[in-house]
Image: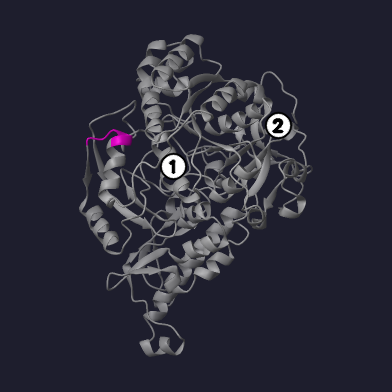
Amino acid sequence: MSVEKKKPVPSDIEIAQAAVIKPIVQVAEDYGICDECIDHFGKYKAKVRLEFLKQNAGLPKRAKYIDVTAITPTPLGEGKTTTTVGLTQGLGRIGKKAIAAIRQPSMGPTFGIKGGAAGGGYSQIVPMEDFNLHLTGDIHAVAAAHNLCATALDARMYHESRWSDEFFKKQGLTKLNIDKYQVLWRRVMDMNDRPLRDIVLGIGGIDNGPLRQSGFDIAVASEVMAILALSKDLRDLRERIGRIVIAIDKNGKAVTTEDLGVAGAMTILLKDAIKPNILQTLEEQLAFVHAGPFANIAHGNSSVIADLIAVKVGDYVVTESGFGADMGFEKFVDIKCRTSGIFPDAAVVVATVRALKMHGGGPKVTPGKALGREYTEENVELVKKGVANLVAHLNIVRKFGVPAVVAINAFPTDTQAEWDAIKDAAIKAGAVDAVVTKNWADGGDGAVELAKAVVKAAEMPSDVRPFYPLDLSIKEKIERIAREVYGADHVAYSAEADKAIDKFSELGYDRLPICMAKTQYSLSHDPLLKGAPKGFIFPVNDVRIAAGAGFVYPLSGEINTMPGLSSKPGYHGMDIDPDTGRITGLS
């Protein structure tokens, strides 16, 4: 291990900064990735060149492929990334060459309320500061590509309003006749900034471009980020970028980035971002950290290209999907795995006593506020009431034909009786095993039993399959997910949603998979419905298209694509020592 373990466990950043980090070239070479196959970003992080995948295209899938998902979380999170890293370390402890593959976090939540996302305690990916901040600049590249398209779109509308068809013809162009009331492309930035959610462009006169309503999304909600995560190579990236639908013209036809003439330039800005980043765990296992699509409005999984490389060089590849099994795992199989052709051998469902007490009727959990005594004292009955949520998530995983193990992420206030109640419910619900994990405090040693259970599960016969065939209609796919995954009785569509479905079906997008956008805090659309709600009406407010990424995304409930900052954001207490450059306060 590259860091000495201490009790009590220090802060995440203190642990990460105390670690003796191995040069990334040595970690890569341990997995058969030579120095000539990586581009260095300093001593401890690098990108794997795409040539490595081409050179090893004939190698078969070697690794067992494990997805880490979770129950419906509290706003505090339940330690899914910590478990992902811990399982990777635990597999290393039992002699397996394991690799972690996770998303790069947005700096908006890092400076907002969530803090960092490199794991926690003695199960982290390092260097932690680089991981949580700019890393190698991929999110900036995504934002630049996205905003290049936005400015090109507004410039085209401006000039088309001023010049004749003949003028454009002389330049080798044809007017796109974009309907300014059906522009689908907003701007993005990688910070939480609520005043930019809804804005008006072109104020100040005709020379400032067309006057129209628009707004900003956070960069990781961009379709460009989803495309980066799903592309298998540079050619695939270029083709997907060219398929992005940015507007509807005045005749009702889709206008794409290819029509605008900007797709090639957007791809140029992503030519390095498509190369997956590599870092390492605190116990020196290889960690791919690449792409970071939003988990509620996009598919919430790390990159396909990282996994395509990882399964050729490791024994086990441990990835994670955003939020619970209803969100990340369903999209993992139905969108990511369909694209990559790699399907999971087993899944891990992360649960905590805290979250199950919330689902059992415990008081509201609010970031920044002390937990009620129900969460800090033993209350087995509350846990037993809440395990319905765990059972529901296990049932979702089982619907896909994937063996599941439950990881009970241990907290100091938990009791054995509470753990026993969770284990009993998990085994009765069909889990291969349910294991208490203590890797936050003990690193890989605290996840050895979980690793053994996962190895057992991954060796079991499985019948992994997507949840629905693509030849179903848009509504049929929506309704299958709503009823059989979320537990809804039926689906209610707004007039706007019906109109969008008809339009996208007419344009030929009805055979794409569904990427449902809903709250992560309930199996339903309503964050107040805890546990395992049944028989509710699932509303679809709107339906949008991400043709480049390759999915249709219905919106249910209140979905916000630009977060805001709290009254005391996470950046309070963060600082840097001007003499040493040492960062403090980053969690």
Q: Which residue is mark 2?
A: 283
- Residue 71 among magenta residues: no
- Mark 2 surroundings: few (<14), some (14-19) or many (≥20) residues within 10 A: many
Q: Which residue is mark 1?
A: 333
Q: Residue 522, how many percent across, how many down?
A: 35, 33
- Residue 487 among magenta residues: yes
Quadrant of the image for the C terminus?
top right
Quadrant in the picture for residue 441? top right
Q: Residue 527, how many percent across, how many down?
A: 34, 34
Residue at 63% across / 28% down in the picture?
91
Instruction: Identify the element where label 1 is drawn.
Output: helix
Quadrant of the image for the N terminus?
top right
Mark toward the viewer: 1 or 2 = 1
The region drawn magenta spans 484-489
Measure the alpha-carbon separation of dots 1 and 2: 29 Å
Instruction: State the mark number for residue 96.
Output: none
The scheme the figure's colours follow is one colour
Please, what is the three-letter code of the amino acid marked with disc 1? Val
Vertical order, 157 against 500 (above or below): below
Q: Residue 305, how many percent across, how many down?
A: 57, 51
Instruction: Identify the element where label 2 is drawn.
Output: loop
Residue 418 in sight in this render: yes
Vertical order, 402 against 102 (above or below): above
Please, what is the three-letter code of the amino acid marked with disc 2? Glu
